[in-house]
Image (cartoon, rainbow, N blue to C red):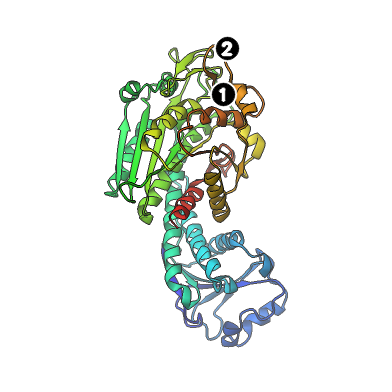
Amino acid sequence: MKFNIINESLIEQKTDCLVIAVFENKNKTIPTLDKASQAVLNEVLKQGDLIGKAGQNTLLYNLPNITAPRVLLMGCGKKSQFSNKNLMSRTKQALAILDKKNCRSVIFDFGFYFINHKKCIKGCAQIAMTAVDRLYHKDQCKSKNKAAVSKINQIGLLVATDFSKQAKQALLEGQIMAEGKTLTKTLSDLPGNICTPSYLANQAVEMAKTSPKLNTQILSEKDMEKLGMGALLSVSRGSREEAKFIIMDYKGGKTDEKPIVLVGKGLTFDAGGISIKPSAKMDEMKYDMCGGATVFGVMQNCIKMKLPMNIIGVVPSSENLPDGDANKPGDIVTSMSGQTIEILNTDAEGRLILCDALTYVARFSPKYVIDMATLTGACIVALGDKASALMSNNKKLTKALKKASKESQDRIWELPLWEDYDKQLESNFADMANIGGPGAGSITAGCFLARYTQEYAWAHLDIAGTAWVSGGQSKGATARPVELLTTFLKQQND
């Protein structure tokens, strides 16, 4: 996909289609083009078939004195309510319409929105993300009947001359962001028999070959055993696939600069172990590694955006299956921190692999640690698929993540880590239990992780409801929260 910034009049632009925004209650919204086309455009608007309501559209052909053979008038709603979300929707709609035509190049004119500097820069990035993102298809494992590839390979944007340089950079970053999200979706949508812990480890090794600033290290089960990662290793005992502990170390900042560490849960398949899950929708448990896949997408973004900071991505990866050697309810394991855990439910395994990872990353003396995990069904009950849950032990980090959430339009909602909830983890036989009872399941999971993060500033994102879309034709990974975390990292560098 090629993107261009257009500063000149659209009248003589050589493109297959001009896409022109039309807003509600605005007559003669396109004076320059209308004059060139001998008032044809506004005659169309006067007919009342298109009055600017969001989603309305009219495709016109061979207008007088306009070089482009097509002009698509796109209803965009009220000017005062037009936002990046609307911009994304209208861009998707326009590209879907023109994909059915013989169009290979398109130029967008969203009028007033690209005259404002801040809106222009964000809008350019959004259009690039939207255009590239829609090229992703979930057909990696199909032998035939693959989804049609978009014919459109060139997109131009009309922007104010003063913003050209920043707009070009925004287009590049939007394209990179979409490619990072594509990587996360690709890994997430692969089945568990292909995307194993070893597969993820190999992907990390290959990524390191793309940049001299990235170093990848893979710890084997023997390495983890020497480190005392008894909680993580207890989860992998029921699987024939060896667990892998993946470390991706990106050194883009100064040598003495403290790194930001991202930890992603990498359960490549979760059957629940002895506490086995219901069979319905168990196929979707290949998505229990979306936290780990998010780390891959963000790390790729860091490399391509050349972020001048130190970032470490950590993915503890395993399967959780029932077996004669698998964890049993009532078993007690010792974590890397030395704390003992009574396993009351083997399906609460994500926190077992994460707690050892969170103990391990303290050695990096991190500025911040953020983990992301499809951790609890309780999070879906609480927040549905609209927002990820946020829990943190640091107000400054919480504020920064909320700021990035607003900027990226990827919603998060803070939940408390009160001592009252932490008490639910008490065990008669070990330092703690791995579940805290039926109430506040997402919060008690956060409290469990908090016990391993007292040495540094930490935040936990429960993405169980947001990481993928469940069931039907729409089933697939969303790549949330790749954009949120990349935005957070960029803002840390501002």
Quadrant (top left, top right, bottom left, bottom right) of the N terminus: bottom left
Q: Residue 250: give x, y in percent of width and height.
A: 34, 46
Residue at image coords 57%, 25%: 279
Secondary structure state at the residue bearing disc 1: loop
Of residue 60 and residue 280, the one placed in the foreground of this image is 280
Q: Disc 1 to disc 2, how far (Cα)? A: 26 Å
Find disc 2 in the rendering and name its residue. Answer: 428
Which amino acid type is shown beneath numbered disc 2? Answer: Asn
Where does the C terminus fall, quadrant-wise? bottom left
Label 2's element?
loop
Q: Using the image, determine if residue 123 lies above or below residue 302.
A: below
Q: Residue at x 46, y 49 (%)?
A: 181
Q: Residue at x 41, y 35 (%)?
A: 315
Q: Quadrant of residue 314?
A: top left
What's under tag 1, amino acid-wise? Lys
- For disc 1, the marked residue is 277
Label 1: how many Cα within 10 Å (few below 14, some 14–19, many 20+): some
On the question of residue 258 being in view, the answer is yes
